[in-house]
Structure formats: C-alpha cells, structure tokens
Amino acid sequence: MSQNSPENRLAKEKSPYLLQHAQNPVDWYPWGEEAFARARTEDKPIFLSIGYATCHWCHVMAHESFEDQEVAGLINQTFVPVKVDREERPDIDAVYMKTCQILTGRGGWPLTLFLTPEKEPFFAGTYIPKEGVFPQTGLVELIPKIHHVWKNEQDKVQKSTREILSHLRQTVGGTRGEFPGKSILERAVQDLGQRFDRMHGGFGDAPKFPSPHNLLFLLGQGKERKDRHPLNMVETTLHSMRKGGIFDHLGFGFHRYSTDKEWLVPHFEKMLYDQATLSLAYLEAFAATGNQSYADTAEEVFSYVLRDLTSLEGVFFSGEDADSEGVEGKFYVWDTSEIRDILTEKEAEAVTRAYNLKDEGNFRDEATRQLTGKNILHLLSTDLQKTAADLDLSLNNMQDLLDQARRKLFSAREKRIRPQLDDKVLTDWNGLMIAALAFGGKTLEQEDYTRAASRAADFFLEKMRDSQGYLLHRYKDGEAGIPGFLDDYAFLAWGLLNLAEATGNTRYLSAASDLTRKMLLHFRDEEQGGLFLSADYAETVLIRTREIFDGAIPSGNSAALMNIVRLIQAGENSGLQEEMQELVQAFSGTVQSQPMGFTYFLCGLDRAFQL
C-alpha cells in the first residue's frame, strides 16, 4: 500500500464519517491545502462530497457509487475528490448548502458539488444516483459532461462561479430592521396556529420534524395569555410524539423525524441534539402544567443518553445511525412471531394490543406502499384502560405487565447488531445536553442529572480550549481540535447558565460570561451586525455566513441573544445591553418578515421585553 493511498489519507482522520470512506476506491482527500494544490497542479476540478456519519442517503450513495469501481474510476480521472463531515465543519457545509439552494431550490445530504481549485462552486446537487432515473442524470452520465465543460468551455465555468459568488454574498444571512414591538410574538403564535395539525400535533405535513424550539416559544406565550391555545398546541404535540413510533418505546430516546404526519414511521437515526432540545421541551411543559408524564418522558430520554451516548469521560457522543446490517430501522422493528417467542402468552397479548402490532406489519413501505411484515411499537391508537379491561386486568397491572415485557424485549434487542455509534464529541451539541440535564436536575430535584451536567461542563472548560482560551469544536480519541464555531460558544454558555441556576455555583456564571464576551469579540459582523458562524481567527471558506433560521436546532444567533439577556438579568451587564440591542436589530427585518421561522430568537426577544 502506497503512502498516498486513500486508505491512509482518511484513516488519519478522526471523523467517523470520513473513516466510513477510508476503504473506498475513490481517491478521497480530507478538506485541506493538499487537495487544492493537486487540483491546481493537474488542472482538475474538485469533487466535493459533504455528509455525516448517521445519514441514511449518504450511505446509499456510498454503496451505489463510492464503493463502485466504475464510478470511482470516473471520479478519480476527472476530479480531485474531497470528503467533508458537515458536523465537524459546519462552516464549509453552510456555504455550499447555500450554493445548492441557490442553484436547485433545495438542499439536503449527501451534498455534492464541483468546485474550481480556488474552492469556487459551479455545480451543486444532493444525492445523485449512479445511473440516471428520469428526470435526474446519473453520475456515469454527468461526470463525462462535466469533464467536457471543464476542458472545453472554461468561459461557462467562470461565468457560473461569478454568478454563484455574487448570489452568495447577497445571502450572508438576515436583514436589519427596527427593534420589534411585542406584536411580533402574537403574529408568530397565529402563524404556528395556522400550520398546526390539530389531530396529530406538530406543524405542517409529512415529513414532520419535532422542532422543540417552537414548543418552547409557545410555552412561554401560554404563560402570558388568557386562552389555552398555545399550550394546547404544545400538549397535543408532546403527547403524540411520545405515543408515536418516533419515540423508542423499548430503549427510549427520540428518532430524528417522522416520515408521515402521524409520527408513526420515523427516520430511525437518533441525534444527541434532539434528545437535548426535546427533553428541555418536556421539562418546560412539566413545569407549566404539573403533568407527570412530561417529566417521565424527559427522564426516559436522559436514561437513554446516559446509558448509550455517554463516554467514559462523562461527555456525550453525537448520535446513532438509522441503519444496521445495511437496512434502515432493522434494529428497531419486530415480527409478531419474535414477540411471541420472547414473551409469555399473556405478555405477548398485552404488547400486541397495546403497541398495535399486526402479523402483516403495522406500516407500509414508503416506495411500494405494501405492508412490510414488520412492526414499529407505538401507542397512537391505544386506549390502555380499554386494553386492560379486555385482558381482565386493572390499569396498574396492565402497566406492570407492559414494563416487564418491555425489559425482556429490550434485553433481546440488545443482542442484535446495533446501528453504528457516531462517537465524536461536539462542543455545541454537548452544550445543549448540559443545558437539558442541568434544567432537569433543578426541575425534577434530581442531583444525578446536575452532577452529569457538571462533569461534562468541567470537561469542556478544562480540555476543550486552546492555549489562548478559545473553544475547540470536536473531541475524539483523546484529541481536541477544530476552532470553535458560534454554536459552540452559544450552546455551551447556555448549558453553563442552566448549571449556574441549578447549582448556585457562580463559577459557571463567570464562565458563561467569559465565553459570551469572547464570542462577541471574535464573531461579530462589524458591518451588518449579528454574529458570523466562524471566528475571525479561523479559516474563511469563500464567505463568512451568518445563520439566524431556527432549523433542526436553534441558531447560534438565537441562543446568543437569549444568553445575553440572561446575563443582563444576572447582573453581568457591562456593555451587554447595547450588544443585545444590536443583535436584535441586525436580524429584525428578516425575523419580522416571517416570525414563525425564528421562534427561539423570539424566546430571547420576549425575555428582552421584560428587562
């Protein structure tokens, strides 16, 4: 094996996603000057592929194309291929995802781009099959066309890159406006109400994402209004998600999203950030209503995280794959015959009825619409009181029987081949989990959660900073690296503020204040206001982007606003009032145009109104 073989190149990386591709026949490079220098020397474009370790469609494209000798040969002849883990380098992903959205009107992963050796994009797409399926062109047809254009029509390439860069510079993120009035909060409630699914909970149609920041916003509004509409939206959603297949009823924790509007069939990957933000939503709902089921759900999520996503150092892994043995969801679904083999007759009957299991399966294949013969455990159409009566059991006895059966099924499932664990540790997502555990410890009066949050926070404060005290983004195999991003500072400060409130330890408050001031110093957009995703001392990939949309998780700018307001309320006020005012106005034009897309930003704004 030569020193420059692809196995050696990616094998030196820490990212589980890059390591998944270390044995590909594609001659992959990690992002870096070595790849771009070779592209300049050989006059080749860059084939950039961006994904992440738990991404199902990334696996599909890898198996179809990157493990295929024919496609790999075409890629190697035509391009210098580069692999990027979007979770390690969100700055790279942000720039090129915007490119894809500009060119195609949509985005997603795997993200596929062709770049000049100067990193300028001239083509973008998401998943591309090996062979074309009308109307989509396949890689085996597309690559020769790109090769022809690169060699013979450079004027077209240059025109394309100029136009794309011009658009990118116009979409750095967010427009300025005046400091909004409180009416913006009511508008967001109304907009969410119009998209609310009254039957199943959640917002919009399939696929349906949890979006817990929407729920946190509505919980805040529910406290301030006389009508129950905001709280009803929250409670319907929380009940439906907990009953649905999006929740793992055996091992606990939430899957990424539901492919249908009923929350039945999930995309089976489990991500740390979903566990953190959803447990925060359930805890806030418990605090608002006193409903013990919300506290129970948060505790179930914590038990999953502390059991399966916690390292020996007490910090938290990034997530678990959707696939095992090459099949999405195989680890989680059941045949009724398996259930009967594992459980007693009475347990099997109780589980089959309560969790809506059927011999023919209880969900249909997404493509064929045929019943699969497999079952996802769910409680969506279950009346436990009636089921107990049908089995001549009291409700308490029914619950005991189901708990006993659950433990048996969980033990049996643990013998299956597990989905791959993404065992890299990210500062931002850990900050969210620290925030959730600290709030859980305080709200539920559970010292174990507070201790787990403190242990993780202490690790980041001691081991995840460089020689100048700046945060680092990723920890893996004993090594910390990659300069921290805005979300690292904002989310870790969020966790530290929650810890300060849970423990009364002013050390955490001081650390949150220090991180926030470093963030304001090195991430500020001096021209437009707001905060860039990357620091002024880090690599700039074409442009520095600003993120404000609250998507799968709140944006770093939204979390920063909330942190600043909380620090002001805690007496850490030196200069922060002006910073808060500037941050709000930097994005006010965008937020006022469609407030529903910025609900965690509105949480911070609502708190700012109370100053």
Image (tube, rainbow, N blue to C red):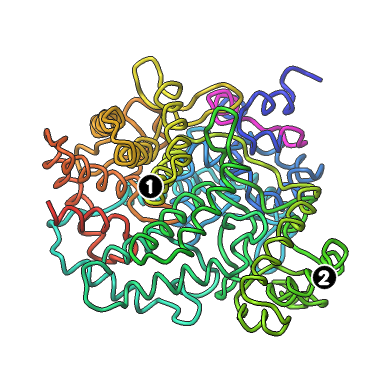
Residue 595: x, y in percent?
28, 65
Tag 1's secondary structure?
Answer: helix
On residue 336, which mark appears? 2
Q: Which image quarter holds the N terminus?
A: top right
Residue 386: x, y in percent?
64, 84
Which residue is nearer to you in this view: 547 or 347?
Answer: 347
**Residue 544 in sight in this render:** no
Residue beneath disc 1: 439
- Mark 2 residue type: Thr
Instruction: Classify residue 267 as left or right of residue 413.
Output: left
Question: Is residue 245 a member of the stretch shown in magenta?
Answer: no
Q: How many marks?
A: 2
Q: Residues within 10 Å of mark 1 (few under 14, many from 20)?
A: many
Q: Residue placed at 40% from the left, 50% from the top?
A: 163
**Residue 186 in sight in this render:** yes
Q: Residue placed at 74% from the left, 73% from the top?
A: 350
Which residue is nearer to you in this view: 313 or 323?
Answer: 313
Q: Is residue 345 above or below residue 279?
A: below
- For marks 2 and 1, give the CA distance: 39 Å
Q: Earlier in the sequence, mark 2 or mark 1?
A: 2
Q: Residue placed at 76% from the left, 48% from the top?
A: 414
The stretch in magenta equals: 22-38
Instruction: Classify residue 61 as left or right of residue 585.
Output: right
Tag 2's secondary structure?
Answer: helix
